[in-house]
Amino acid sequence: MLNLLSPAALIAMAALFAWCGVHALRIKNAVLKWSGAGLAGLLTVAVLVASAFMINGLVRLDSRSAAAPNIKVAATPGQIERGHAISDSFCGACHSRTGTLTGGVDIGKDLPIRVGSFVSANLTPAGELRHWSDGEIFRAIRNGIAADGHWLIIMSYTNAGRLSDDDIEAVIAYIRSQPAAGEITPDPPDQLNPLGLIMLGAGMLPRGKPVLSGAIMAPPKSATARYGEYILSYQDCRECHGANLTGGIQGQLAPVGPGLDMVKDWKPAEFISTLRTGIDPTGHELGKQMPWRPIGRMDDDELTAIYEYLAHLRS
């Protein structure tokens, strides 16, 4: 309802400017007459364009769709253990800042432009997920769509959908094993403000990663470049460090990170130490926006696999 009020208010404002323009034409002084009418006309057009973009943004908010698979996760001890590892090294970067999977952090504050509020959801039974099926949680991770069909904007911007089917089921098993904790978070968790709606309608905000269908399988876990490539397919390193991991570009939504091809000059132990301590081999401290703490919770084989992949990047 609040989203519908914004374009309605803009249309009313445009009508007011148009009314002012018509009345300006009745002014006898030619300078005031045409300058007033011209200004009112420009403002009317500008506000109408903004309202058109906002309406288009509202349409785009409801344009993402995908079916939820009909699955029931067994929640074996092995799945829960694997889900715990993924949660600690990936999901927790947003959902565990205030407690294990309790969410409650407005990620919108970390964006260069405040386009809305994006509060990480409480994934414990204290949150909405207790009402969701396993298939609905799977769809939320894979394609950024909530149980009621609304678009999970920030989730769709991440690469979480690249997790293998088995790993997503492991995350679901771990989520289901957690006790209720924390406070209830907003539902829906993502709320674009008027500027965000205008930017979305104008094509200035991403529409999210493409909707994925079909199964995704991970290679066997090992300290190899192949497994490192899999890890980096779902970790969001490319959002900051560029599509090829050779450096971000100005104007991207995420913070601009340096090229990771620098790793080829490091030893594997130095790379692992960097992600465990936040200090690289030159003594440089990693920035606060770099989620090195959760990434550093991966085991040595996983971190070595990432190193092997990065060490063979082409500059």
Image (tube, rainbow, N blue to C red):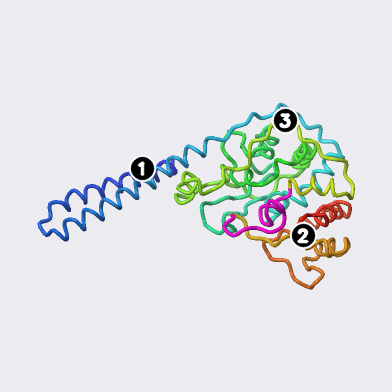
Which amino acid does the dot numbered 2 rest on?
Answer: Asp
Name of the residue lying farthest toward the bottom: 283
Residue occupied by mark 2 = 261
Of marks 3 and 2, the one in the foreground: 2
Relative vertical location of residue 59 with respect to residue 308 in this rendering, above or below:
above
**Residue sitting at 81 percent across and 62 percent down?**
276
**Residue 101, position in %: x, y?**
71, 49
Task: Give the extent of the magenta segment.
Answer: 235-252
**Residue sitting at 69 percent across and 41 percent down?**
125
Residue occupied by mark 3 = 214
**Residue 139, position in %: x, y?**
67, 35
Task: Tell me the CA gap for discs 3 and 2.
Answer: 32 Å
Of marks 2 and 1, the one in the foreground: 2
Disc nearer the start of the sequence (1/3): 1
Residue 311 lies within the magenta run: no
Which amino acid does the dot numbered 3 rest on?
Answer: Gly
**Residue 84, position in %: x, y?**
80, 46
- Is residue 263 rendered to the left or right of residue 132? right
Residue occupied by mark 1 = 8
- The local crowd at label 1, few if under 14, some if 14 to 19, many if 20 or more residues have their Cα within 10 Å, is some
Magenta span: chief secondary structure: loop
Disc nearer the start of the sequence (3/2): 3
Specify the quadrant of the image occupied by residue 36. Answer: bottom left
- The local crowd at label 3, few if under 14, some if 14 to 19, many if 20 or more residues have their Cα within 10 Å, is few
Task: Tell me the CA gap for discs 1 and 3.
Answer: 41 Å
Relative vertical location of residue 206 with respect to residue 273 in this rendering, above or below:
above
**Residue sitting at 52 percent across and 36 percent down?**
62
